Image: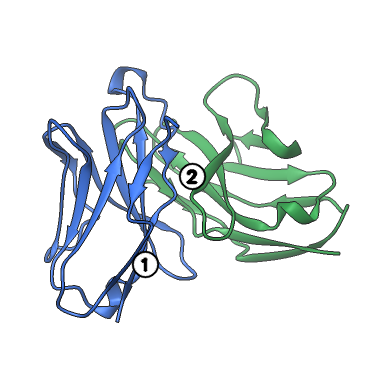
Chain colours: A blue, B green
Amino acid sequence: NAGVMQNPRHLVRRRGQEARLRCSPMKGHSHVYWYRQLPEEGLKFMVYLQKENIIDESGMPKERFSAEFPKEGPSILRIQQVVRGDSAAYFCASSPQRGRNTGELFFGEGSRLTVL
Amino acid sequence: AQSVTQLDSQVPVFEEAPVELRCNYSSSVSVYLFWYVQYPNQGLQLLLKYLSGSTLVKGINGFEAEFNKSQTSFHLRKPSVHISDTAEYFCAAFSFGNEKLTFGTGTRLTIIP
């Protein structure tokens, strides 16, 4: 399956712990996006990355959240010292390189974070 | 700034009846427009997209949408819905310069048997 792979699909953390969400883009895609979906809300953009570069992080909370997309390996969204309000579904999406980018994103199945 | 508005948060429709899900966008530049569908506890799947050319776009599962530049709309339609169409539908817009897909808040389509 060459689709966008996210893991874990479900993650439970207690307040104050760290959450790490991973995303492997589709083969041949070099752009990765992270979106957050809160209950009963739409998808909110968080961050846009290319390999080793953060292109746009205008949707990322100023504290506790960080993202990376290293040269090798998956993209990681990291949430430190989680709070109950971080409970949400986090979706990763990928797209081809900029020259061929039509705006269409290919989404993973999402990682559902529950903070107790 | 770019924004997408889906006025209807929930739309109940009887099985085999037609449906229209509304979407309006605002952007100071040309946009590409998309409709995605999300089934319960799943990711988003592309239904259809408008990039250029014919303003009537046909997608999967019998859905179609019409791009109306003067009304800045991209409404989604299906002439006869099925129980399996029960899902959340998201309209989205992409513009160069913004470089990210902006989503509406979604419309939950419920099919009544």
Looking at this view, is A113 or B93 the one in front? A113
Q: Residues within 10 Å of mark 2 (few under 14, many from 20)?
A: many
Camera sees residue A90:
yes
Chain of the residue that carries numbered disc 1 in the rendered image? A
Q: Is residue A31 left or right of residue A78?
A: right
> In the rendering, at what x and y percent does residue A5 appear?
37, 42
Looking at the image, which residue is at 16% across and 73% down?
A17
Looking at this view, is A22 or B44 the one in front? A22
Marks 2 and 1 share the same chain: no
Looking at the image, which residue is at 86% across and 64% down?
B113
> In the rendering, at what x and y percent does residue A72 appear?
14, 32
Q: Residues within 10 Å of mark 1 (few under 14, many from 20)?
A: some
Quadrant in the picture for the N terminus of chain A? top left
Looking at the image, which residue is at 73% across and 44% down?
B77
- Residue flagged by tag 2: what amino acid is it? Ala
Residue under circle 1? A88
- Image disc number at residue B92: 2
**Secondary structure beneath label 1:** strand
Q: CA distance from mark 2 to mark 1?
A: 20 Å
Numbered-mark total: 2
> In the rendering, at what x and y percent does residue B105 appear?
49, 60
Residue B97 falls in which quadrant of the image? top left
Camera sees residue B64:
no
**Secondary structure beneath label 2:** strand
Chain of the residue that carries numbered disc 2 in the rendered image? B
Which of discs 2 and 1 lies nearer the camera? The answer is 1
Q: Is residue B109 left or right of residue A67?
A: right
- Image disc number at residue A1: none
Residue B64 falls in which quadrant of the image? top right
- Residue flagged by tag 1: what amino acid is it? Ala
Looking at this view, is B112 or A25 the one in front? A25
Looking at the image, which residue is at 63% across and 36% down?
B68
